[in-house]
Image (cartoon, rainbow, N blue to C red):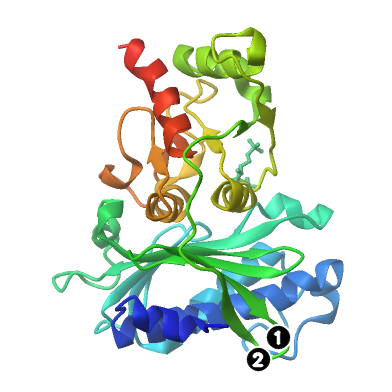
Amino acid sequence: MKRLNSQLQKDGAPLELILLIRTLLAGCKEISFRVSQGALAGVLGSTLSENVQGETQKKLDVISNQILKDTLKESGYVKAISSEEEDTVVPCNPNGNYLVSFDPLDGSSNTEINSLIGTIFSIAHAPQWMDADDPSAFLQPGTQMVAAGYVLYGPSTMLAMTTGKGTHIYTLDKTHGGFLLTHPNIQVPAQTSEFAINASNQRHWEAPMKAYVGDLLAGADGPREKNFNMRWVAAMVGDIHRVLCRGGIFMYPYDNRNPSKAGKLRLLYEANPMAFLMEQAGGLANTGHGRIMEVMPTEIHQRVPVLLGSKEEVETCLTYYADAK
Ligand code: FDP
């Protein structure tokens, strides 16, 4: 079975990017180990890393953030980091060539119920003109990403990643510690009869989303003339993994609970990396008003509405937005 390294080489990734990805994944393997300790993670600690010893009472999302920060800072490849867990950017090596953005532990409320969680990341080139502590360097549209992916900490630990040459899924072989290519070049089915949304927010949605989901729920008796099934892991990384593997549409739309927030999910740490994976697997990723990867960020913690998944289903959803104009 092919290893990560040879697939990255086959996809033409430059050596320094490969080394950076391997460094990042070394941190994720340690997170995987700590996550697997579950409730014991705060009690037993780990023998894997010195740098977080003594901090084992912290929550797993804080520990995960620290692991990734330490690992990437030491690598020398990274000029700056932006993390969902940090108020502002973390400067690293002033001569580093890359910027890394991540959500260290997505769906962290699932840690309490031993359910799916994961790390989501993206990598872009560091502009030469920037200072390492300058957040504006991160304000690039998603089209500038050179790699993106997630590591899912589930019954097995899996990596979904793209460097722009298709989306590949790997499984961590814990016997030798490497990621093996188990699902090369996956393709999201264009059609689906499965959708994912937190329907408890229905009364807060905009009219097009209410109409679209209303028609899905009407099933074979409504205008869609077929029944749909609903799934909600409540960790984006788990829901997107399902959509990548067997199709579906995932939505966290704009809602009017807090009009100052454009959505719940973060552009840099969640929406953009998932959009890149989805598009590389033949799916679509949109805000309802345009392609996610073309959104020009105005600040690093920006939120966006997210509609992504099976191509034809996303297109159908978008017709409701177009009709509302
Ligand atoms: P969480 O707050 O648990 O980290 O990142 C936000 C996120 O999880 C997503 O992973 C998930 O899809 C969404 O929030 C779930 O939100 P709701 O609790 O509103 O359903």
Q: Where residue 309 appears, x then y in whole percent?
A: 49, 41
* Vertical arrangement, residue 7 with respect to residue 76, above or below: above
**Residue shown at the point (29%, 59%) measured from the top left:** 138
Instruction: Tell me: 35 left or right of 125.
Output: right
Q: Which residue is mark 2?
A: 50
Query: Residue, x 40% and y 87% (percent of image)?
Result: 19
As displayed, is residue 52 above or below residue 100? below
Residue 159 percent across, percent down from the top left: 56, 68
Q: Which residue is identified by label 1?
A: 53
Quick check: 321 left or right of 161?
left
| Residue in the image at 57% along x and 49% along y | 240
Up the image or down, 269 lies above or below 209; here it is below
Q: Are marks 1 and 2 in contact (CB under 8 Å)?
A: yes
Q: Is residue 297 visible?
A: no
Secondary structure of residue under mark 2: loop
Say whether residue 19 is visible.
Answer: yes
Nearer to us in this view, 173 or 307: 173
Which amino acid, mark 1? Gln
| Residue 227 percent coordinates (x, y) | 66, 21
Q: CA distance from mark 1 to mark 2?
A: 5 Å
Local packing at callout 2 (Cα closer than 10 Å; few below 14, some 14-19, many 20+) is: few
